[in-house]
Amino acid sequence: MTSAPDPFPVTFSAHWQEELDQLFVWRRDVRHFHTEPLPEAVLDHLLRTACLAPSVGLSEPWRFVRVDNPQRRAAIRQNFLHCNARALEGRSGEDAQRYATLKLAGLDDAPHHIAVFCDTNPEQGRGLGRSTMPQTTTWSAVMAIHTFWLAATARGIGVGWVSILDPDAAIAELSINPHWQFLAYLCVGYPADPSDTPELERRGWERRNPARRRWLHR
Ligand SMILES: Cc1cc2nc3c(=O)[nH]c(=O)nc-3n(C[C@H](O)[C@H](O)[C@H](O)COP(=O)(O)O)c2cc1C
């Protein structure tokens, strides 16, 4: 019996596969950062890696925006505080008390802020794959974010996704093309509290659900 030829010119050994599994286990949403900045070459590498993500029609609709300007950062911080306060107002009793104890963004400490947008109607890709499911551009850009996140984790770098923001206000605060869709505000830097367990689980807010690990069948 002949064995199947190696599918790739590189070998992903069993040991490497186990290490990759550990990468998925240790990828965290990080809200506590050291303030030390990352080397620019590392950030550039993460962006190039993110751009290896799949995209509908090869449209590459992601747009990564570095936010370095202190006034713009301050505006985003106010945006977050406002939205988080509104989210708290919508809760009551013990639920509100527990919500108030959660740290839901690392905006103050993270040395790098990266806003991610999707060009929902890009010329690139010439519309392929989008006629029945136009949301696929958004999904493509989210895949780039996840690729960025994993590549960062592999280098000991933390990423925290902040979504408690008014997207229209964020677009105005960052002077972004209003036709781009706001997807994420990423805090990036060296993590201060690496863990193999989500922070929301460590704080008793929510737990991973074993039922989600089972297939559904039709
Ligand atoms: C689309 C998206 C939006 C998120 N928004 C926030 C957020 O605004 N604030 C926050 O603290 N975490 C946010 N998170 C992180 C989740 O809370 C986190 O992924 C989840 O608790 C599991 O933890 P883990 O990523 O460390 O495994 C977001 C994650 C995703 C995928």
Image (spheres, rainbow, N blue to C red):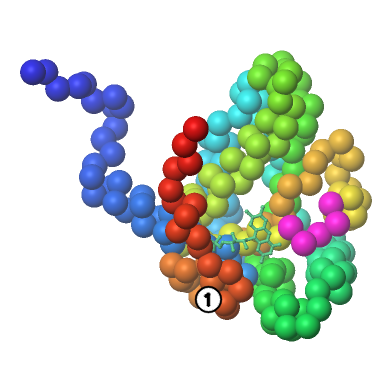
Disc 1 marks a residue whose amino acid type is: Arg
Which image quadrant is residue 163 in?
bottom right
Q: Residue at x 44, y 51 (%)?
A: 213
Q: SS at mark 1?
A: helix
Rendering coords of residue 180 (x, y %): 82, 38
Q: Residue at x 52, y 41 (%)?
A: 49
Callout 1: few (<14), some (14-19), or many (20+) C-alpha neighbours within 10 Å?
Answer: few
Viewer-side residue, 145 vs 48:
145
Please tell me whether residue 175 is drawn above or below residue 121 in the rendered image.
below
- The secondary structure that most of the magenta stretch takes on is loop
Rendering coords of residue 97 (x, y %): 74, 83
Residue 112 shows in this picture: no
Along the horizontal axis of the image, is 182 left or right of 156?
Answer: right
Tag 1 residue: 202
Along the horizontal axis of the image, is 34 left or right of 107?
Answer: left
Residue 193 shows in this picture: yes
Q: Residue at x 68, y 30 (%)?
A: 136
Rendering coords of residue 128 (x, y %): 67, 16
Please tell me whether residue 146 is drawn above or below residue 209 in the rendered image.
above
Quadrant, the N terminus? top left
Which image quadrant is residue 105 in?
bottom right
Magenta-drawn stretch contains 5:
no
Q: Which residues are magenta?
A: 163-167
Which image quadrant is residue 59 in?
top right
Asked whether mark 1 lies closer than 8 Å to ligand 1, one says: no
Q: Residue at x 84, y 70 (%)?
A: 90
Which quadrant of the figure shows ligand 1?
A: bottom right
Along the horizontal axis of the image, is 77 left or right of 124?
Answer: right
